[in-house]
Every structure is written in C-alpha cells, then in structure tokens.
Amino acid sequence: MKRYYPWLMAIMGMLVLLVSNGMIITGLTVFDESLLKEFGWSRSELKLRDLITLVLAGWIAPFLGAVIDRVGPRKLILAGIALLAALYYAYAHVQSLTHLYLIHAGFAAVLVAAGLNVAVIFVSQWFVARRGTAIGIALVGTSLGGMVFPKFGVHLMQGMNWRAAFAWEAIVPLAFLVLAYLFVRSPRPDGIQPWGADRTGNGGAVPTAAGLLPDIDYRDALRTRTFWVLAFVAMTTFFSIMAVSANLFLHMRDLGFEPAQAGNGLGLMFGLAMLGKFLFGFLADVLPAKRVFLMNLAVMAIGALILATMRADLIWYSLALFGLGWGGLYTMIQLLAVNAFGLSSAGKILGTITLLDATTAGLGIWVTAKIFDVTHSYHSAFVLICALVVLALLAATLVRDERARQSAT
C-alpha cells in the first residue's frame, strides 16, 4: 500500500483544488442573480469582487512562493481551507459592496495558500516519473469543483434563501480541513519515496530525462524565452477562461435558459475541463509536451469561436470544446514550467506567472461585465476572447526545453 501513497497525495491535491477553486471561482456565480436583485448593483460592480480576488492573489503569489519553497505546502493548505470556511460564513451576512470586496480580498489569500501553485508543487514533490499524469489528476479538482458547487448552490437555494445557503456551504471546507490535517504530507528522505525515485517505482520505466537535468534558478528562468511565452499564454488564456466561466451563468440566463440549465452549462464546461486535465496530462507522458500544449490551445480556440456566434443552439458545443481545451491548458502550463525549470525554484516561478495571469484573469471577469453594461450584450467580449486565444496559440509555438538546452551548451 505504501508504494501507491504518492497517488493518494495526487488525489489529495485534487480535493484541495476542488474545495478552494470550486467554492471561490465557480461556486459563487450561481448566487449572482440573487445578489443583483437584492442590492441593485450593476454587473461590473458585482464582478469587481473577482478582479480584487485575482489581482491580490497574483500579487501575493510571488512572495508566498518563497515561503512554499522553504516551509512546504502543508501548513499553507490547512490555513487556507480554515480561512475559506470563515469567509463563506461571512458572505451570509454581506450588507454592502465594501463588505463584499473585503471578503474577496480574503479569498485572494485562500487561492494563494490552498490554490493552484501550492497543489502543483505539493503533487510534483511526490513524482519523479508520471508527473504529467499526477498533475493532471490534481488539477481535475478545479473542474470537479466547477461541476459540483454550482449545482450544489442551485440545489440549496431551492429550499432556502442565498444567505442561508452560504452559511450551510461553510461546513464543506470545515469538513475537508479535518481530512487535510490527517492525510496531507510531504515526502521525507527517511519515509515513503516519490513515485519513480528508485527508477522502478513506475512499473520499471526509467524517469524522464527532464527529471535528471539540473534545475534553473529563478533569476535565470526570467531570462529565458520559455518563461515569458508561458506567462503570455497564461495571461491571455486565463483572461478568457475566467471571463467566460464567471459570466456564463448570467449569459445563459440572458439567452433564455432556466437556472438549472445554466448550472448544467457550467457543469458541462467544467466536466470537459476535468476530462481535459487528465487526458492531456496522460498524453504529455507519451507525446511531446509542446505538441500536446498546441492541441489544447487549438481546441480551446475553436470553442471560443463558436461561443462568439452567440447562438443558443450551439452553446453546448462551444462549452464542450472550450472546457476540454481549457482543462488541458491548466495541466500543461504547470507541467511545462516544472519540466523546463525544475522544482527548486518552482514556487517563485509559478508565483510570478500567477501574478501576471491572475491580474489579467480578474480583468477578464470585470471587462466582460463592463462590456455587457455598456452594450447590453456579451458579443464583443466573446470576440475579444477568441482573438486572445488565437494569439496564445501562435505564441505557444515558441516554447522550448530550457533545461535540456542549457545542459547542451
């Protein structure tokens, strides 16, 4: 059983992201209609909360990245989940925009302490071989959260008001906190070894060459072309991803879909993203990672193009393709960064990319809502999203293996 312990840690990484990202990024969107009706805010006023969360998370991430590299992810995960429970309970008592924005500033700390970077580093520590598959499993959590929590929120509001629903949902992170305290562990030299560390733990396969190359430190990484290409792709695509996911529920309601159907739309997009994370993570272990990366972006671009047609009868196809490409993209950016630069400075490197992409992600949510407020339509915003994904696809052709390149010179 100890032999397979690293895979249990991959599942724990998945659950961390299911709770943190699921409750903050997507679970909140089903409450938007109720908040707008009760307080009379504009969509851009409401969505400014997400800009606050993501921009603050982005600016905190590089500083906390150094902490991750020194103290490890366990304490950060536990603190982040505990804070999430407290903030969800506070959400049940919101009375003003100021109160709302303060809560979302707190959500920024949650996303940094128990979010994407920490989960990726935590899982990567447990794998020398099969790292792409393991990261794919962990990142399934963001999509699974997008499937579970919107539907859970809609279900709760069928029997109670939105304030009571928030209070009840606060129990979820409390329950997970106990589970994380019991099971989240980092590998130790005198304990269970990472998968593939003995060169036979993966069923006899030798670890990938990338796992044997020397790491590139943070300052040298910033001088490479690949770092800035990955940052650009992350910035443009995360603008697009968050713009669509945060406004999709309201968009589908505008198109005439019932609340349950709009929740199903989110579920479809995140369900296909979940499949994409695992599928493309697996493919990255058997095909060149760059080729898989380009496939992700091409699929996502096609989905964005269909979404921009604004046709209600095609929206399910657009969400399926956009979600599938998006899911693989999440996995591949993290995997390519770890493979290109190594783990020793991964917290700082991924933290800096997060600073950049979280800023544009927050802008994506707010700009899309602002465009709607001005034009009374999401069409112009979705055309912009399509253009950004195509630019990301073109830029991704410039990615290269920096560690292999450095070793060859």
Image (tube, rainbow, N blue to C red):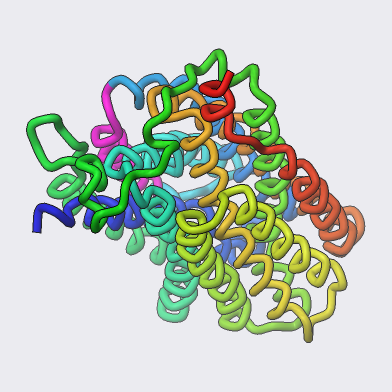
- Find out whether residue 41 is within the magenta segment: no
Quadrant assignment, res 115: top left
Q: Residue furthest front?
A: 408
The answer to whether residue 138 is above or below residue 83 is: below
Residue 363: image quadrant is top right
Image side of residue 40 versus residue 102, left or right: right
Q: Residue at x 32, y 40 (%)?
A: 122
Q: Is residue 92 visible?
A: no
Q: Is residue 217 visible?
A: yes
82 or 66: nearer the viewer: 66
Residue 155 placement, left or right of 400: left
Work out which quarter of the rendered image holds the N terminus and state it. Answer: bottom left
Closest to the observer, 337 or 118: 337
**Which residue is located at x 32 percent, y 56 percent?**
15
Residue shown at 47% from the left, 36% from the top:
338
What kind of secondary structure does the magenta stretch mostly adopt? helix
Specify whether residue 75 is painted magenta.
yes
Q: Outermost residue toward the top?
A: 219
Q: Position of residue 100 (x, y in %)?
A: 54, 44
Seen from the viewer's position, the closer of residues 374 and 199 is: 199
Q: Please state which of residues 205 and 318 is positioned toward the viewer in this rendering.
A: 205
Residue 52 appears at what percent x and percent y? 60, 37
Q: Position of residue 256 (x, y in %)?
A: 75, 83
Q: In the image, what residue occupies the spot 42% across and 38% down?
A: 209
Q: Which residues are magenta?
A: 71-89
